[in-house]
Amino acid sequence: MRPTSKLSLALALVLICLSSVGPVFGRDLPDFTRLVAENGPTVVNISTKQSSSIAQRLYQHSIPGLPDGSPLEDLFRHFFDDEGPSPDDRLQSRSLGSGFVISGDGYVVTNAHVVEGAEEIVVRTSDRREFVAKLVGTDKRSDIALLKIEAEGLPAVRIGSGKDLKVGEWVLAIGSPFGFESSATAGIVSATGRSLPSENYVPFIQTDVAINPGNSGGPLFNLDGKVVGVNSQIYSRTGGFMGLSFAIPIEVAMDVVEQLKTKGRVSRGWLGVLIQDVTRELAESFGMPQPLGALVAQVLPDSPAAAAGLQPGDVILSYNGRDIPTSSSLPPLVGATPVGEHASLVVLRRGERIELKIRIQELPEDNQLADHPEPFDKPTVNRLGLLVRDLTPEMRQQLKIEHGGVLVESVDQGPAASAGLSAGDVILMLDNQPIMGLADFERILAAIEPGRVTAVLVQRGDTRMFYALRLTKP
């Protein structure tokens, strides 16, 4: 065979290989056109109106920090009385968001923050019709709102499952970013069960789908065209999309919707504990092979946890048979438990696993929990670089500590300073043992071997938290 013939044959073989491989790669990329065509009409645009007095806004904000009784106060008020806008003049503002129809008779789901403070809510469908919506109810803790418009035969979404999502799975969002209606963006699931700092009761779906202002409240679809989440938040340093977006699982949203429709409000389960993550050092102090679970830093009085005998220092390892890998895994499970039901907890207490049964109560309103803020800072004594003393009755009354504990008067260099303790902290537990007074504290401290890591429970202000300390030689 001549060289040119061999070359032609080789080229032909390469072309055959490429033609057979090409479609394989192409099949890995989904075609969203049919999904968008079928589900686009179910997505709506939401605009709201809020109004406030022009005079009120200018008077309150034009001279921030104006002291009471200032001569300028009279001058500024005189300006409004004689020359400026009257208190009846109003400013109107509009915000844009998204939503989706869940039933043909006009029920629409969106985010609570989209309609917060709205005097009027306007829903515009994909066929350009506009409806003034009735707000059925909102739930700030889940950021879900339910609206009702007077319409029949509307195209509605199909509800899927956020629980079945896998990391790497394709998802698609439809919404109105920056007011551009019916915009579709696609990406993959980056993580599931994400906990955000201010959202304890929602295990968010994290995606890299492009979400921007105006997408809030819109649906997140899987490739079957079913809604698996409600787009809610983004992480951004610029105010725009930076590759991190978060959606509320549809199961959480629909549970809220059902409660808003039937009761007009949302109730959640409540344990009555303040919890924190188990760090590597704390795990070592508790004799745990690895850090996991939710460490109980405080048990609130008159709570289900108090009634069941849960104690500070307990590490909750499982809840109703479900493992608790981190402290953020616990609140969504408790919140989803029907009020009045019993839950089973597996708890690690001083090296032993015990099982507790707890009757779940309803989560109180925020103002009822105001006296129990979440824990925050740090602890320790002498080998620790601390000077401590007993609490006086006046101190106990002021700090709301009925019994036990020692007061940190000063902190020198040492393990306590490294951990972040400061004067004014109260040490309540050391080495998993309650501290009843100064003598008790010194006895427990002296029995701890040098170099060992131990846990200390400290109260600072109204908050309590555990810290791990590695003790030096006496």
Image: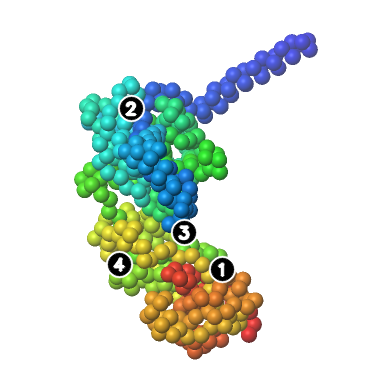
> From mark 1 to mark 3, how far is it between C-alphas?
15 Å
x%, y% of residue 264?
Answer: 23, 47
CA neighbours of label 2 inside 10 A, class few (<14), some (14 to 19), many (20+): many
Label 2: state its secondary structure: strand
Task: Please give left or right for residue 451 compared with residue 110 in the image.
Answer: right
Please tell me which of labels 2 and 3 falls first in the chain: 2
Q: Please give the residue where the numbered disc 1 appears in the rendered image.
A: 281
Q: Determine the image quadrant of residue 298.
A: bottom left
Disc 3 target residue:
326
The Cα–Cα distance between marks 1 and 4, rounded to whole angstroms, is 29 Å
Q: Closer to the N terminus: mark 4 or mark 3?
A: 4
Is the residue marked by circle 4 packed among few (<14), some (14-19), or many (20+) residues within 10 Å?
A: many
On the image, numbered disc 4 is attached to which residue?
304
Mark 4 → mark 3, Cα distance in angstroms? 21 Å
Residue that appears at 35% across and 38% down: 86
Q: Nearer the viewer, residue 279 or 67?
A: 67
**Which quarter of the rendered picture does the N terminus lie within?**
top right
The answer to which of marks 1 and 4 sits earlier in the sequence is 1
Question: Do labels 2 and 3 touch, CB within 8 Å?
Answer: no
